[in-house]
Image (tube, grey):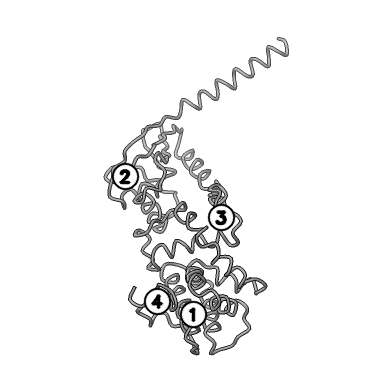
Amino acid sequence: MSAKSVSILHDQVNQNALMARVARIRSESVLVTPEMARKMRDNWHFDRQRRMSDDNIIRLSGEMKNDYFVDGTPIFVCETPDFRRFIVNGNHTLEAVVRLGRPYPLVIIYRSVNSEDEVAAIYANFDLQKARTWMDAIRASGKGENIPLASKAVPALGVIQGDFTGQWELASHSRTSRIEMLEQYAPHIELISSALAGTPRASQNYVLRASVLAVALETARYQPTAAFEFWHAVAAEEVVKPHPAKALWSFLRNMEATGGYTARQNQTKAAALGWNAAFQGKNLEYCKPNAWSSFHILGTKWKAGK
């Protein structure tokens, strides 16, 4: 057999193999109701999957509610020879439909597999694929790429969208809506970036937490001169107690390894407490957010009782 014939035969074998792989895949566009989503999650559950993230479910249902979620987002399902089905990608999307409480158009992709071990291998591959970062989304939008701290500011804008309440399902909680706010907040983001310039990196990171940066951005929006001075003082570590900036810095440092909803809320309150004391020219030994019932940021639209 000639070399050319061997090459043609090799190409044909490869083509047949690829077509065989294609034959194992089918898809359908479905208007998935909350009842359908609940049934799929209950009956097609893959035991080896990671824990569900309630924050992610709330975010996705908020995007659906505000028409930012992409129609036709795929749900990937594996089918074994004994007709069992396992969801390997899209669990959070289905739970978001349940949370939304109304139908949403999705695409369900079915992939035939030989065993549950193959399901696990496919699931692991989905998990290892790199998620898009905020900076990826900003670049794709063509907006705000040159704004300093843009990737840090976008999550903070979500806190502002939620009225500092943490009730994300009441806000337009999509990347698109926040990125659209970037240009509006660009001067305020740049001011905070300038205030943090040259300060210790660890202290910068305290201020750049979304729950804290949201407060900083609003102070920069309404009180730029005072905001620059206060947030520089927080990050520079040059002042001492009872200066409010030092009280806030100490609180944030002690919360460094703490996460979760309550921690985020307390950081937001502490940031406002520190700012309010400084804005009034008062001393502050300690930030005690748990004892504070009426969230407000003095000198801004975020007034007591809002």
Residue 189 placed where, x, y %? 55, 65
Q: Residue at x 53, y 78 (%)?
A: 254
Residue on which disc 1 sits: 275
Return the x and y of residue 114 as percentages of the image width and height: 46, 33
Q: Nearer the viewer, mark 3 or mark 1?
A: 3
Residue 3 higher or lower than 211, as above or below:
above
Which residue is identified by label 4? Answer: 296
Q: Are marks 1 and 4 in contact (CB under 8 Å)?
A: no
Q: Which mark is residue 205?
A: none
Earlier-in-chain disc, 3 versus 1: 3
What residue sits right under mark 2 in the picture?
37
Q: Residue at x 59, y 19 (%)?
A: 13
Viewer-nearest of discs 2 and 3: 3
Q: Amino acid at mark 4?
A: His
- Mark 1 or mark 4, which has the lower sequence index? 1
Marks 2 and 4 sit apart, C-alpha to C-alpha, by 40 Å
Query: Horizontal and vertical percent for residue 103?
Result: 29, 43
Pointer 3 residue: 144
Q: CA distance from mark 1 to mark 4?
A: 10 Å
Q: Secondary structure at mark 1?
A: helix
